[in-house]
Amino acid sequence: MKRGVKHLFPFSSISIPGIIVLLLVFLSCGESRRGRLVMTFIHDEVKIDDAAASPAREIVSGSRITCDKKAVAVVQMGESGVFVARAVPSLEFFIPTDRTRVDLAMNEGRLGVVVKRKGAPVIINCGTTRLETRQGVFDIAAGGDLCEVRVFKGSVVASIAPSDGKSPEPRTIKENEKVEIDTAGMVTSRLGSHEKAMGRALEQVVLLKLDDPGFRSDAEEGIAVPAKALRELAPAGEEDISGGLRLQLLERKHGPLSVVQLKRGEKIIGYASARRNMLDVITVKGKVTVPQKDIQSVARYSAALR
Protein backbone atom coordinates (compact mmCIF):
# COMPACT_ATOMS: atom_id res chain seq x y z
CA MET A 1 0.00 0.00 0.00
CA LYS A 2 1.28 3.41 -0.97
CA ARG A 3 2.15 5.78 1.80
CA GLY A 4 -0.37 8.60 2.15
CA VAL A 5 -3.31 6.63 0.76
CA LYS A 6 -6.22 6.72 3.25
CA HIS A 7 -8.56 3.85 4.02
CA LEU A 8 -12.12 4.67 2.92
CA PHE A 9 -14.84 3.58 5.37
CA PRO A 10 -18.59 4.10 4.87
CA PHE A 11 -18.75 6.57 7.79
CA SER A 12 -15.45 8.32 7.15
CA SER A 13 -17.27 11.59 6.44
CA ILE A 14 -19.05 11.53 9.83
CA SER A 15 -17.16 12.92 12.79
CA ILE A 16 -16.78 10.98 16.04
CA PRO A 17 -19.10 13.42 17.90
CA GLY A 18 -21.71 12.93 15.18
CA ILE A 19 -21.59 9.16 15.59
CA ILE A 20 -21.97 9.50 19.37
CA VAL A 21 -25.02 11.74 18.91
CA LEU A 22 -26.62 9.21 16.55
CA LEU A 23 -26.01 6.39 19.03
CA LEU A 24 -27.52 8.38 21.87
CA VAL A 25 -30.60 9.18 19.79
CA PHE A 26 -30.96 5.52 18.83
CA LEU A 27 -30.64 4.36 22.44
CA SER A 28 -33.01 6.99 23.80
CA CYS A 29 -35.62 6.04 21.20
CA GLY A 30 -35.26 2.39 22.09
CA GLU A 31 -35.63 3.03 25.80
CA SER A 32 -38.61 5.34 25.29
CA ARG A 33 -40.72 2.54 23.83
CA ARG A 34 -43.06 0.54 26.04
CA GLY A 35 -43.12 -3.23 25.59
CA ARG A 36 -46.08 -5.36 24.62
CA LEU A 37 -49.04 -5.61 27.01
CA VAL A 38 -49.91 -9.04 28.41
CA MET A 39 -52.47 -10.12 31.01
CA THR A 40 -50.61 -11.82 33.87
CA PHE A 41 -53.27 -12.23 36.56
CA ILE A 42 -57.04 -12.77 36.83
CA HIS A 43 -59.18 -12.88 39.97
CA ASP A 44 -62.93 -13.51 39.66
CA GLU A 45 -64.83 -12.62 36.47
CA VAL A 46 -62.75 -10.74 33.89
CA LYS A 47 -63.51 -10.35 30.18
CA ILE A 48 -61.58 -9.09 27.16
CA ASP A 49 -63.84 -7.75 24.40
CA ASP A 50 -66.86 -9.55 25.97
CA ALA A 51 -65.10 -12.97 25.98
CA ALA A 52 -63.74 -14.71 29.09
CA ALA A 53 -60.15 -13.58 29.72
CA SER A 54 -57.25 -15.98 30.21
CA PRO A 55 -53.72 -15.54 31.61
CA ALA A 56 -50.90 -14.85 29.12
CA ARG A 57 -53.35 -13.18 26.71
CA GLU A 58 -51.76 -10.30 24.80
CA ILE A 59 -53.61 -6.98 24.85
CA VAL A 60 -53.68 -5.28 21.45
CA SER A 61 -54.67 -1.72 20.62
CA GLY A 62 -58.43 -1.32 20.92
CA SER A 63 -58.82 -4.11 23.48
CA ARG A 64 -61.41 -3.54 26.21
CA ILE A 65 -61.18 -5.20 29.63
CA THR A 66 -64.22 -5.63 31.86
CA CYS A 67 -63.89 -6.50 35.55
CA ASP A 68 -66.80 -7.66 37.71
CA LYS A 69 -67.41 -5.88 41.06
CA LYS A 70 -65.18 -8.41 42.86
CA ALA A 71 -62.65 -8.86 40.07
CA VAL A 72 -58.98 -7.93 39.71
CA ALA A 73 -57.03 -8.02 36.44
CA VAL A 74 -53.30 -7.31 36.02
CA VAL A 75 -51.88 -6.24 32.66
CA GLN A 76 -48.09 -6.08 32.43
CA MET A 77 -46.40 -3.51 30.19
CA GLY A 78 -43.20 -5.09 28.90
CA GLU A 79 -40.66 -5.20 31.71
CA SER A 80 -41.44 -1.70 32.94
CA GLY A 81 -44.73 -1.80 34.84
CA VAL A 82 -48.25 -3.06 35.44
CA PHE A 83 -51.87 -1.89 35.44
CA VAL A 84 -54.09 -3.34 38.19
CA ALA A 85 -57.80 -2.96 37.31
CA ARG A 86 -60.41 -3.52 40.03
CA ALA A 87 -64.17 -3.36 39.48
CA VAL A 88 -63.69 -1.51 36.19
CA PRO A 89 -66.70 -1.91 33.83
CA SER A 90 -64.63 -0.75 30.84
CA LEU A 91 -60.88 -0.21 30.45
CA GLU A 92 -59.72 0.44 26.89
CA PHE A 93 -56.14 0.35 25.61
CA PHE A 94 -54.78 2.37 22.68
CA ILE A 95 -51.22 1.59 21.61
CA PRO A 96 -49.51 3.21 18.59
CA THR A 97 -47.58 0.85 16.33
CA ASP A 98 -44.25 2.37 17.42
CA ARG A 99 -45.22 1.86 21.10
CA THR A 100 -43.95 5.31 22.02
CA ARG A 101 -46.79 5.66 24.52
CA VAL A 102 -49.71 3.76 26.06
CA ASP A 103 -53.16 5.36 26.29
CA LEU A 104 -55.96 4.04 28.53
CA ALA A 105 -59.56 5.18 28.95
CA MET A 106 -61.93 4.42 31.85
CA ASN A 107 -65.02 6.09 33.34
CA GLU A 108 -65.55 4.06 36.49
CA GLY A 109 -63.73 1.77 38.92
CA ARG A 110 -60.22 1.63 40.38
CA LEU A 111 -56.94 1.39 38.52
CA GLY A 112 -53.53 0.94 40.12
CA VAL A 113 -50.55 1.96 38.00
CA VAL A 114 -46.94 0.92 38.63
CA VAL A 115 -44.33 2.27 36.19
CA LYS A 116 -40.88 1.27 37.46
CA ARG A 117 -38.79 2.22 34.43
CA LYS A 118 -38.85 5.76 33.13
CA GLY A 119 -39.71 5.96 29.46
CA ALA A 120 -42.46 6.93 27.05
CA PRO A 121 -45.56 8.43 28.67
CA VAL A 122 -48.49 6.49 30.05
CA ILE A 123 -51.69 8.51 29.52
CA ILE A 124 -54.97 7.72 31.29
CA ASN A 125 -58.27 9.44 30.49
CA CYS A 126 -60.96 9.33 33.21
CA GLY A 127 -63.99 11.27 32.03
CA THR A 128 -62.85 14.90 31.81
CA THR A 129 -59.55 14.21 33.61
CA ARG A 130 -56.30 13.41 31.80
CA LEU A 131 -53.39 11.88 33.73
CA GLU A 132 -49.85 11.43 32.43
CA THR A 133 -46.75 9.85 33.96
CA ARG A 134 -43.40 8.47 32.89
CA GLN A 135 -42.55 6.82 36.20
CA GLY A 136 -44.47 6.36 39.44
CA VAL A 137 -46.88 4.34 41.57
CA PHE A 138 -50.41 5.67 41.93
CA ASP A 139 -54.06 4.68 42.25
CA ILE A 140 -57.12 6.10 40.52
CA ALA A 141 -60.78 5.93 41.56
CA ALA A 142 -63.12 7.15 38.81
CA GLY A 143 -66.84 7.75 38.49
CA GLY A 144 -68.06 9.81 35.53
CA ASP A 145 -66.50 13.28 35.71
CA LEU A 146 -65.21 12.61 39.24
CA CYS A 147 -61.70 11.30 39.76
CA GLU A 148 -59.51 10.73 42.82
CA VAL A 149 -55.76 10.22 42.36
CA ARG A 150 -53.41 9.00 45.10
CA VAL A 151 -49.69 9.14 44.32
CA PHE A 152 -47.45 6.82 46.36
CA LYS A 153 -44.19 7.30 44.41
CA GLY A 154 -43.04 9.50 41.57
CA SER A 155 -45.45 12.06 40.13
CA VAL A 156 -48.49 12.40 37.87
CA VAL A 157 -49.53 15.40 35.78
CA ALA A 158 -53.30 15.98 35.93
CA SER A 159 -55.31 18.23 33.64
CA ILE A 160 -59.02 18.91 33.21
CA ALA A 161 -60.80 19.24 29.87
CA PRO A 162 -61.65 22.85 28.97
CA SER A 163 -65.00 24.12 30.33
CA ASP A 164 -66.75 27.28 29.08
CA GLY A 165 -63.72 28.02 26.95
CA LYS A 166 -61.39 27.94 29.94
CA SER A 167 -58.57 25.42 30.26
CA PRO A 168 -57.24 25.10 33.84
CA GLU A 169 -53.49 24.82 34.27
CA PRO A 170 -52.20 21.23 34.59
CA ARG A 171 -51.12 20.26 38.09
CA THR A 172 -48.30 17.92 39.10
CA ILE A 173 -49.44 15.54 41.84
CA LYS A 174 -46.43 14.62 43.93
CA GLU A 175 -45.52 11.71 46.18
CA ASN A 176 -47.85 11.18 49.20
CA GLU A 177 -50.51 13.51 47.77
CA LYS A 178 -54.18 12.83 47.05
CA VAL A 179 -56.15 15.01 44.64
CA GLU A 180 -59.92 15.01 44.18
CA ILE A 181 -60.78 16.24 40.69
CA ASP A 182 -64.05 17.31 39.10
CA THR A 183 -65.03 19.81 36.41
CA ALA A 184 -64.83 22.64 38.98
CA GLY A 185 -61.18 22.03 39.87
CA MET A 186 -58.81 20.07 42.10
CA VAL A 187 -58.52 19.74 45.88
CA THR A 188 -55.24 18.41 47.32
CA SER A 189 -54.63 16.63 50.64
CA ARG A 190 -52.04 14.28 52.18
CA LEU A 191 -52.28 10.49 52.15
CA GLY A 192 -53.38 8.65 55.29
CA SER A 193 -51.86 5.45 56.67
CA HIS A 194 -54.50 3.18 55.11
CA GLU A 195 -53.95 4.79 51.71
CA LYS A 196 -50.20 4.25 51.98
CA ALA A 197 -50.91 0.56 52.65
CA MET A 198 -52.64 0.42 49.26
CA GLY A 199 -49.45 1.77 47.68
CA ARG A 200 -47.37 -0.92 49.36
CA ALA A 201 -49.78 -3.58 48.05
CA LEU A 202 -49.43 -2.27 44.49
CA GLU A 203 -45.65 -2.46 44.72
CA GLN A 204 -45.91 -6.16 45.65
CA VAL A 205 -47.35 -7.00 42.22
CA VAL A 206 -44.64 -9.04 40.49
CA LEU A 207 -43.16 -8.20 37.09
CA LEU A 208 -42.93 -11.55 35.27
CA LYS A 209 -40.35 -12.25 32.55
CA LEU A 210 -42.62 -12.32 29.52
CA ASP A 211 -40.00 -13.93 27.26
CA ASP A 212 -39.20 -16.69 29.75
CA PRO A 213 -40.48 -20.18 28.69
CA GLY A 214 -42.04 -20.56 32.14
CA PHE A 215 -44.03 -17.32 31.86
CA ARG A 216 -47.29 -18.93 30.75
CA SER A 217 -47.38 -21.40 33.64
CA ASP A 218 -46.44 -18.61 36.08
CA ALA A 219 -49.35 -16.52 34.80
CA GLU A 220 -51.77 -19.44 35.04
CA GLU A 221 -50.65 -20.19 38.59
CA GLY A 222 -51.32 -16.57 39.54
CA ILE A 223 -48.00 -15.81 41.21
CA ALA A 224 -48.05 -12.26 39.84
CA VAL A 225 -50.03 -11.05 42.87
CA PRO A 226 -49.13 -12.45 46.33
CA ALA A 227 -52.09 -13.42 48.54
CA LYS A 228 -51.32 -10.63 51.03
CA ALA A 229 -51.43 -7.99 48.31
CA LEU A 230 -54.60 -9.47 46.81
CA ARG A 231 -56.43 -9.08 50.14
CA GLU A 232 -55.65 -5.37 50.02
CA LEU A 233 -56.37 -4.91 46.31
CA ALA A 234 -59.52 -7.01 45.77
CA PRO A 235 -62.67 -4.85 46.03
CA ALA A 236 -65.65 -5.73 48.20
CA GLY A 237 -68.60 -6.99 46.18
CA GLU A 238 -70.90 -4.25 47.42
CA GLU A 239 -68.44 -1.41 46.76
CA ASP A 240 -69.98 1.37 44.66
CA ILE A 241 -66.95 3.37 43.58
CA SER A 242 -68.84 5.92 41.51
CA GLY A 243 -71.46 6.44 44.23
CA GLY A 244 -68.78 6.78 46.91
CA LEU A 245 -66.97 9.46 44.91
CA ARG A 246 -70.18 11.43 44.43
CA LEU A 247 -70.81 11.35 48.17
CA GLN A 248 -67.26 12.60 48.80
CA LEU A 249 -67.88 15.47 46.41
CA LEU A 250 -71.19 16.27 48.12
CA GLU A 251 -69.48 16.31 51.54
CA ARG A 252 -66.73 18.55 50.19
CA LYS A 253 -69.25 21.09 48.90
CA HIS A 254 -71.75 21.14 51.78
CA GLY A 255 -70.24 19.58 54.92
CA PRO A 256 -70.61 16.35 56.98
CA LEU A 257 -73.22 13.93 55.64
CA SER A 258 -75.97 12.10 57.51
CA VAL A 259 -77.91 8.87 57.11
CA VAL A 260 -81.61 9.58 57.54
CA GLN A 261 -83.55 6.41 58.40
CA LEU A 262 -87.27 6.71 57.66
CA LYS A 263 -89.91 4.76 59.57
CA ARG A 264 -91.03 3.03 56.37
CA GLY A 265 -87.53 1.54 55.97
CA GLU A 266 -85.99 3.87 53.38
CA LYS A 267 -82.53 5.40 53.93
CA ILE A 268 -81.49 8.80 52.61
CA ILE A 269 -77.82 9.84 52.55
CA GLY A 270 -76.89 13.47 52.20
CA TYR A 271 -76.37 16.85 53.86
CA ALA A 272 -79.26 17.35 56.28
CA SER A 273 -80.64 20.60 57.71
CA ALA A 274 -83.79 21.05 59.81
CA ARG A 275 -86.45 23.73 59.39
CA ARG A 276 -89.64 23.81 61.47
CA ASN A 277 -91.17 20.33 61.25
CA MET A 278 -89.30 19.34 58.07
CA LEU A 279 -85.83 18.02 57.24
CA ASP A 280 -84.10 19.04 54.01
CA VAL A 281 -81.54 16.55 52.68
CA ILE A 282 -79.25 17.43 49.76
CA THR A 283 -78.38 14.14 48.04
CA VAL A 284 -76.30 13.33 44.95
CA LYS A 285 -79.56 13.30 42.96
CA GLY A 286 -80.92 16.56 44.35
CA LYS A 287 -82.80 17.96 47.33
CA VAL A 288 -85.28 15.82 49.29
CA THR A 289 -87.64 17.16 51.98
CA VAL A 290 -89.27 14.82 54.52
CA PRO A 291 -91.55 15.52 57.51
CA GLN A 292 -89.71 14.99 60.81
CA LYS A 293 -92.58 12.79 62.06
CA ASP A 294 -91.64 10.23 59.37
CA ILE A 295 -88.01 9.99 60.55
CA GLN A 296 -86.85 7.12 62.75
CA SER A 297 -83.24 8.24 63.26
CA VAL A 298 -80.45 10.48 61.96
CA ALA A 299 -76.81 9.37 62.18
CA ARG A 300 -73.46 10.64 60.90
CA TYR A 301 -72.40 9.04 57.61
CA SER A 302 -68.82 7.97 56.96
CA ALA A 303 -68.01 7.95 53.23
CA ALA A 304 -66.78 4.59 51.93
CA LEU A 305 -63.87 6.05 49.95
CA ARG A 306 -61.14 7.77 51.96
Image (cartoon, rainbow, N blue to C red):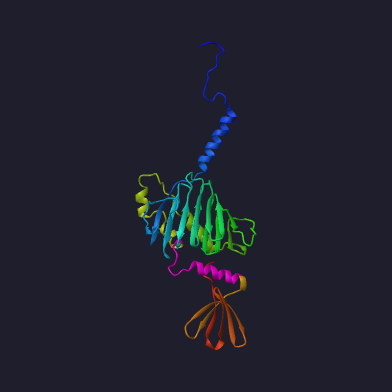
The one of 183 and 150 positioned closer to us in this rendering: 183
Identified at 51% across, 48% down, the residue is 101
Instruction: Check residue 120 for magenta coloring.
Output: no
The one of 173 and 132 positioned closer to us in this rendering: 132
Identified at 51% across, 69% down, the residue is 243
Q: Is residue 9 above or below residue 181?
A: above
Identified at 58% across, 33% down, the residue is 21
Give the side of residue 42 with respect to residue 151, left or right. left
Q: Quadrant location of residue 250?
A: bottom right
Question: In x, y percent, where is residue 263?
Answer: 49, 86
> Looking at this rendering, what residue extends furthest in the top direction?
2
Question: In x, y percent, where is residue 298?
Answer: 54, 81
Identified at 55% across, 59% down, the residue is 150
Report the magenta stretch's main SS.
helix
The one of 292 and 43 positioned closer to us in this rendering: 292
Residue numbers of the magenta segment: 233-252
Question: In x, y percent, where is residue 290?
Answer: 55, 84
Figure label count: 0
Give the side of residue 78 with respect to residue 20, left or right. left
Question: In x, y percent, where is residue 152?
Answer: 55, 56
Q: Is residue 201 above or below residue 262?
A: above
State the quadrant of the C terminus.
Answer: bottom right
Q: Is residue 152 above or below residue 80?
A: below
The one of 106 and 153 positioned closer to us in this rendering: 106
